[in-house]
Amino acid sequence: MRFFKLIVLSAFLIGIAVGGGAYYMAGKEAGPTITIHSPEKYVGRSTPLAVSIASETELAGTIINVEQNGKAVDLQNMKMDRPGPGQINASATIGRDGLVNGPATLVVDAGRKTFFGLRTVYSHERRELTVRLDPPRVSVVSIHHFINLGGAEFVVLRATPEDVDAGVQVGDARYRFYPGSAVGITDPAMRVGFFALRHDQNVSERISAYARDAAGNEALVPLEHQPFVKKFVQSKIPIDQRFLDRVVPAIASNTPDLKIDTGSPEGLLKGFLKINGNLRKKNGDFIASLAEKSEPRMLWTEAFAQMMNSQVESRFADRRTYYFDDKEIDRQVHLGFDLATVQQAPVRASNAGKIVFADFLGIYGNCVIIDHGLGVQSLYAHLSQIGVKVGDAVTKGQEIGRTGSTGLAGGDHLHFTMLLQGTPVNPVEWWDQHWLQDRVLRKITEAGGSPPGGQSR
Ligand SMILES: [Zn+2]
């Protein structure tokens, strides 16, 4: 009997020990997963706060606070969504109401139930924040802004504080500006740059100077300007079987992911439409991505040079309708100039700069792109030969290749375009020394700068 009691007692004690051990161990388990989605670092006048807390068991004791100067700020608009017992999505807008400029800390404490709901285990997260409630300031310094549809214009801005992004916004597009030091302006508040009015935008598009700081505070002022409508040419492009036979297989073999069937006339026509549509778009996106490689200084001072003795076969933003067997098959906009002289004529750099692309590029065939700094680039397409490589510095007039008919080209010619932060713009302005003098260099000089001279890097 005593022996039996001893067993019961032992079992009881083991039970306590095991249970206690389990209870103790449960306390060592990980707390819920806390994820702070925003803010990243800066809090502006109105900044979203988003925190999610997740656990496989029921959550308990959640506290989300923004602390500043030793006190928790009242987050009145905090919303706590609970899609399940183990999930909380918290959101609020923080900033002007309750916070002041300076450091702050986001503190998140969250617990979850464990050991049959008898214990709670916690997680803690903190994030150091910087509160910036003063909006940046921006004003337009340069005067006389004229903008052609499809063209570009230069502007000098003043933006403070010094670390804000500033530039010009044209409808849905933003053109980020460069420090004035890029053109010899010593005042650190000055910014310079070009903006474009795209050929497919409205001539009455709203154009503003903007400044935006790291906390998302923004200032916007209208840019006084005079826009000019530009009529673009409508043209008909007849496509025949001979053209498809020559052009489509060459591009198809260089672009296997288009999966073009080159074995039949129907396949070639379908392939042409893929090339003229999808590939044109893809190539355009790639070209736009090269804008970020632009140097933050002006690498040129003279007007750009049009190819010597060339005949203009097609202009910027021609609206092209394509026909096959007298039936309309496609429409595209031609975003450059087609210039023809003789076969395999030398192609020269239109201005000083640095090669950022020199390779085969879909519809453009063998293609060279030169960066001239300040977001300005020039493109040369359909070359038979490329004579430069990425990274080469070129001078104005230096030979960079030979004309040809590679890519989507009907015959030997140079397709030339100017790009502004990746947006094709009308080269005519850039070829005009008077335009450069009056619209760009004048504004730099008036702002106390001096465009760099004699580039031969
Ligand atoms: Zn062209």
Image (cartoon, rainbow, N blue to C red):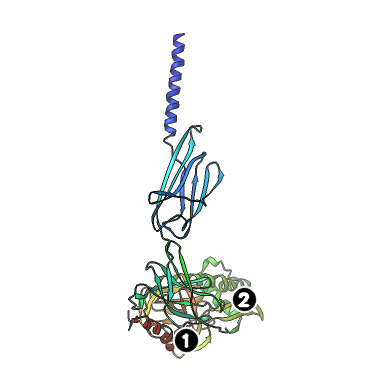
Residue 407 in the image: x percent, y percent? 51, 76
Residue 351 in the image: x percent, y percent? 39, 82
Residue at the (52%, 39%) spot, across then down: 58
> Quadrant location of the C terminus?
bottom left
Task: Tell me the tag on residue 330.
Answer: 2
Residue 134 in the image: x percent, y percent? 42, 63
Residue 418 higher or lower than 22, as above or below? below
State whether residue 137 appears in this view: yes
Dot 1, how many residues are within 10 Å of its Cα: few (below 14), some (14-19), or many (20+)? some
Q: Nearer the viewer, residue 297 or 383?
A: 297
* Label 1 element class: loop
State whether residue 349 appears in this view: no
Look at label 2 and name its amino acid: Asp
How many marks do you count on the picture? 2
Name the mark nearer the viewer: 2 or 1.
2
Dot 2, how many residues are within 10 Å of its Cα: few (below 14), some (14-19), or many (20+)? some
Query: Disc 2 vs disc 1: Cβ atoms closer than 8 Å?
Result: no
Look at label 1 and name its amino acid: Gln
Left or right placement of residue 320 versus residue 4 in this view: right
* N-terminal label among 2 and 1: 2
For the view shown, which residue lies furthest in the bottom direction? 309
Residue 25 in the image: x percent, y percent? 42, 32
Q: Which residue is mark 1?
A: 343
Residue at the (66%, 81%) spot, across then down: 326
* Label 2 element class: strand
Alpha carbon of mark 2 to alpha carbon of mark 1: how far? 28 Å
Q: Nearer the viewer, residue 284 or 210?
A: 210
Residue 283 higher or lower than 5, as above or below? below
